[in-house]
Amino acid sequence: MNLHRVAGPAEGSFVGGMGNRIGRLVVVLLTVLLAFGLRAGSLTAQSLWRDEVDALCYAFEFPYLVARVLDPVAAGDLSTPCACPPPPVVSVQGQLQGLSLHRLARVMGPMIRQNGPLYFFLLQGWVAMTGHSVYALRFLSLWFGVLSVPLTYVLGRRLLGRTAGALAAALAAASPYLVWYGQEVKMYSLISALALLAIYSLRRAVDGGGKRWWVGQVIVTSLAFYTHVWSALLVPVQVVLLLSWWPRWRRRWPEALVSLALLTLPYLPLAFWQVPAALRVRETGFPHHSLGEMALILLNGW
C-alpha cells in the first residue's frame, strides 16, 4: 500500500508562500544585523565632540533648572557635570520672578530654542540606567539608527513593494550619513526614526487602516516636533504626500484635515522659542553652500 500522500495545489501554494515569507524575513533580519554591525563596530572610534557634550549638558542641567525654578535654595545642593559651562544656570538669576510655570518657560528657553527637549529628557533617563561611558551614551542613538532600517523596509514595501522595501532598507543600513548620526550623542537618528514612522502611519491611515493610524500619525509627528525645530517640515511633506495620494483618501478627507489641523496644537508651546530662532539670520561659523552644492555633497555622501 502506498502511504505517501501527494500534496495538493492549495497545500503546495501554502508551503511555497510560507517559504517566501521566511526568506523575506531572513533578508530583513540580516539587513538589520548589518546596520547594527556597521554602527556598533566603531561606536567608540572617536571621542565625544563639542555638540555631543552640549547635548549631555542640556540633559544633566534640566533637573537642576527645574529644581532652581521650584526651590532656588534647595537647588544650591545640586551640581552639574564639570564639563558643562555655568552660564545657562547662572543666567537665570534675573528670571526667577512670577509664577513657577512662567519661570520654567524662561529658563528652558536656551535648551529648546534650536532643538526640542524630548531627546534631552530621553538622554537623562538613559544615562541614569546605563552609565556615562562613551559606548553607553552613543548606544541610544545606535538603537534608533538601527530601528530606522526595518521602518524603511515597511514603508518602502507599503509604497513600492517588497523588493523596493528591501533595497531601501539595505541602503539605509549602509548609508554613511545614517551610520555617522547613528553613532552620535545627538537627536538625529531619533528624528529619522520618527519621520519614517510618521509617514508610514500616514500611509496606513490613507489606505484605510482606521482612526488609530490617524491618531498615531499625529502623536509621532508631534514627538518629532519636540525633538528638533526643523521637524516642522514634516507637515508640508505630509501635505504633498496627501495630495499625491488623493484618490486613496478622498472618502476620508475629514480625518486627514483634522489630523493636519491637530498638528498645530502640540507645536504652539515650542513656537514661542523656535520660530524666532529659525527665522533669525546669524553666523554659524560653518562655510556657506548653495542648494546645488548641498545636493552634490549629499550625493557624494551616498
Image: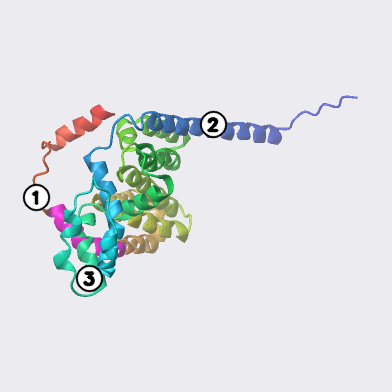
Residue 75: x %, y % from top left: 27, 63
Disc 2 from disc 1: Cα separation: 49 Å
| CB within 8 Å, label 2 to label 1 | no
Which residue does the image show at 39% across and 45% down from the upper left? 131
For the residue pair 175 and 250, the one nearer the viewer reads as 175
User: Which disc is residue 281 wearing?
Assistant: 1
Q: Give the magenta-colored segment's residue range.
A: 264-279
Q: Earlier in the sequence, mark 2 or mark 1?
A: 2
Circle 3 SS class: helix
Q: Which mark is residue 3?
A: none
Answer few, some or many: residues within 10 Å of disc 3's Cα (few below 14, many 20 plus, some between 14 and 19).
few
Corner quadrant of residue 2: top right
Mark-to-mark CA distance, 3 and 2: 53 Å
Residue 122 appears at what percent x and percent y?
A: 37, 52
Q: Is residue 69 above or below residue 180?
A: below
Q: CA distance from mark 1 to mark 3?
A: 27 Å
Residue topped by disc 2 = 26
Decide which of 284, 302 is in the foreground and name it. Answer: 284
Please tell me whether mark 1 sits on a helix, a strand or a loop: loop
* Residue 107 horizontal side relative to residue 171, left or right: left
Q: Is residue 267 magenta?
A: yes
Q: Main secondary structure of the magenta part?
A: helix
Type of residue at label 1? Val
Observer-nearest residue: 84 or 291? 84
At mark 2, the secondary structure is helix
- Residue identified by numbered label 3: 102
Q: Amino acid at mark 2?
A: Val
Q: Is residue 133 above or below residue 269?
A: above
